[in-house]
Image (cartoon, rainbow, N blue to C red):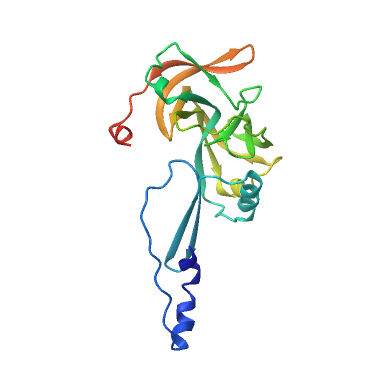
Amino acid sequence: MAGWLLSPLNAWLQAASLPELASPTLHQAEAPKCCWRLTFTRADARLSLYMTQIAPALLTRWLAALTPPAEREHTLPLVLGWCWLAAEEAAKIAPGDALPLQGMAPQPDCFWLSSPDSPEQLRLNDAESGVVVRAALPTVALAAADEICLLAEAGRVSLSAQSLGEWAPGLETPLNAYAYPRLQLSLRGAPWAEGTLLRLDDGWAVRITRRIPASPVAREE
């Protein structure tokens, strides 16, 4: 990143008959499966920063400072909550099993967009409008090395980039939302299982109706 930011100084160094800056050494690596990414562009230069962890308040300030093209639209998952599962138990899950659902609002009308680390949720008024509300931040610990986190996706929503750029509690926004026939549990963006929402005395759960075999690519990972 330092080399990318300082590269415009090369023209000044050349004019002063000084040696150019040394080119940065880059090591290619696979991008994280699910995280925020900021892409900076300058002329023909492009720099992408992947943020696997970021303070919610800082994320809100950064998003508010962006001015995306008004005509651009994004389609994102509508996430009701998430299920923690010990990795060794994952292979044993079968239709009929119920997994406790965490991070879900008292009523199934508030959704996280893509991941449960945002400081806000989207409350749907109907399939064409919604309002941004302040979310109760997750209180569960991050997944341990021997745990997996499954996102419970209820559907998809299409939002304008302008709405996402103005994202803050109280924002009324037009949208286009549709529901899946069944809840979809996903693992790092890949389908893992389907299920139905189950109301419990002390919360919610997902009753598994079908396991989805991993794709060859997912198995290799």
Toward the viewer: 161 or 108?
108
In this view, 67 is above or below 155: below
Where is the C terminus found, in terms of image quarters? top left
- Residue lying furthest front in this view? 145
Question: Would you identify the image quadrant in which residue 112 lies?
Answer: top right
- Image coordinates of residue 24 in percent, x first then y, are 40, 67
Q: Residue at x 36, y 23 (%)?
A: 212
29, 161: nearer the viewer? 29
In the image, residue 114 lies at what x, y percent?
A: 52, 37
Q: Total marks drawn?
A: 0
- The residue lying toward the viewer, choosing from 118 and 160, is 118
Q: Quick one: which residue is furthest to the right in this view?
A: 170
Q: Identify the residue at image location x=68%, y=42%.
A: 171
Query: Residue at point 41% right, 13% down?
Result: 95
Q: Residue at x 62, y 53 (%)?
A: 62
x, y percentage for residue 164?
59, 46
The x and y percentages for residue 152 are: 50, 26
